[in-house]
Amino acid sequence: MTYSHKSMASATRPQHAPISAVRPGRRERRRAETRERIFRAALHLFAQRGFLETTVEDITNAADVGKGTFFNYFPTKEHVLATFGSERLTALERALERAKRGPVLPVLRELLSDFGGQAKENPALLRAIYAAHASCAPVRAELQQRIRAARRLLKQMFSLAQKGGEVRRDVPAQELARLTQVVFFGVAMSWCLNPDAPVRATGEAVWDLFCRGICPKN
């Protein structure tokens, strides 16, 4: 099945209803529950077997749904990974909204030490996801698109921090965002390969060291 990277990203981007929206009806709740069951079954299988080794039939059997039901929610299994990635972007967007109310550094510490919501995930799942990124060109292209989107959000947060005097101004916000991604991608990769310590505690320690280098000199 063919698809564009743009359509894959847009098809899986969470749609947030306004606060004033009416409570979803029973049908909408059931659809959401079915989608979540398929999503979680797929991630569980990716962690157990690997992304490439898991078929759509495996996922539908585990979720106890038909193939048609799967395709109602996810055009391909690659879209499941895109959904996982879109949740990380949602965490960044929410962090940016908190950062706008200031201060910024505590928001960044919480976001990055939680790895955008990945700290609660099984290291086997993260290994499977990284392997899929390395071996599957469409998945890798989607990741690259997501990295660029995440960098733009981080740049906005660092710009706010620089304006507020929380972060040094001699390094461009864009570069701070890039370096932050490089560092925390490495931490996440290291942890999922060798989870010898709690990932959140590791993330907090790395951020505290990183922060010493980006804070203004007294």
Image (cartoon, helix red, strand yellow):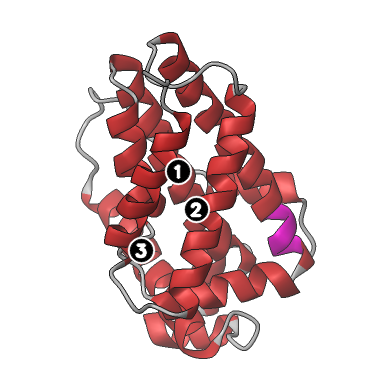
| Cα gap from disc 2 to disc 3, whole angstroms | 27 Å
Residue 151: x, y in percent?
59, 36
What element does badge 3 sit on?
A: helix
Q: Earlier in the sequence, mark 2 or mark 3?
A: 3
Q: Earlier in the sequence, mark 1 or mark 2?
A: 1
State the image quarter where residue 167 is shown: top left
Query: Mark 2 sits on what residue?
Result: 184
Q: Amino acid at mark 1?
A: Pro
**Screen quadrant of the N terminus:** bottom right
Q: Amino acid at mark 3?
A: Glu
- Residue 66 left/right relative to 114: right
Picture disc at residue 36: 3
What element does badge 1 sit on?
A: loop
| Cα gap from disc 1 to disc 2, whole angstroms | 24 Å
Magenta residues (range) = 138-142
Q: Tell us which disc is closer to us: 1 or 2.
A: 2
